[in-house]
Image: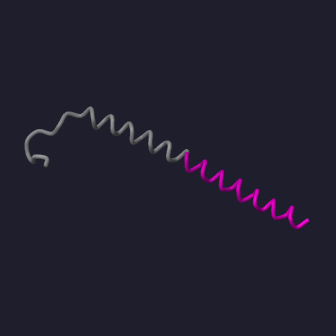
């Protein structure tokens, strides 16, 4: 019976690991989407005029 108990522990840890990483992937997906939208917005803006020159 101890082998079965050990398998249950491994299965529980694996399920928790999968759940945590799925949640992380969902959050990262939202961040990637927002970064893409911000990039498009910044690209559409006209360049600054006057003042300092870029190097």
Residue at 66% x, 51% y: name it: 18
Task: Find residue 48 and report its horizontal and vertical position in percent.
Answer: 15, 39
Magenta segment, principal secondary structure? Answer: helix
Q: Horizontally, is 32 left or right of 46 in the view?
A: right
Residue at 78% x, 62% y: name it: 9
- Quadrant in the picture for the N terminus: bottom right
Residue at 27% x, 35% y: name it: 43
Report the residue that reaches farthest toward the front.
Answer: 3
Compared to 5, does 26 lie above or below?
Answer: above
Residue 27 falls inside the magenta stretch? no
Count of residue discs: 0
Residue at 65% x, 51% y: name it: 19
Task: Find residue 38 and report its horizontal and vertical position in percent.
Answer: 35, 39
User: Would you identify the image quadrant in which residue 16 lies?
Assistant: bottom right
Report the residue that reaches farthest toward the left.
Answer: 50
Q: Horizontally, is 10 left or right of 30 in the view?
A: right
Task: Find residue 29 and report its horizontal and vertical position in percent.
Answer: 50, 42
Report the residue that reaches farthest toward the bottom.
Answer: 2
Name the image colouring: one colour
Compared to 39, does 7 lie above or below?
Answer: below
User: Would you identify the image quadrant in which residue 46 lies?
Assistant: top left
Compared to 2, does 53 lie above or below?
Answer: above
Q: Horizontally, is 20 left or right of 7 in the view?
A: left
Residue 16 falls inside the magenta stretch? yes
Q: Which residues are magenta?
A: 1-25
């Amino acid at each position: 019976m101890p082998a079965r108990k050990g398998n249950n522990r491994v299965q529980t840890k694996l399920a928790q690991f999968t759940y945590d990483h799925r949640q992380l992937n969902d959050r990262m997906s939202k961040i990637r989407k927002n970064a893409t939208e911000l990039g498009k917005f910044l690209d559409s803006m006209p360049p600054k005029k006057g003042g300092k020159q870029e190097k």
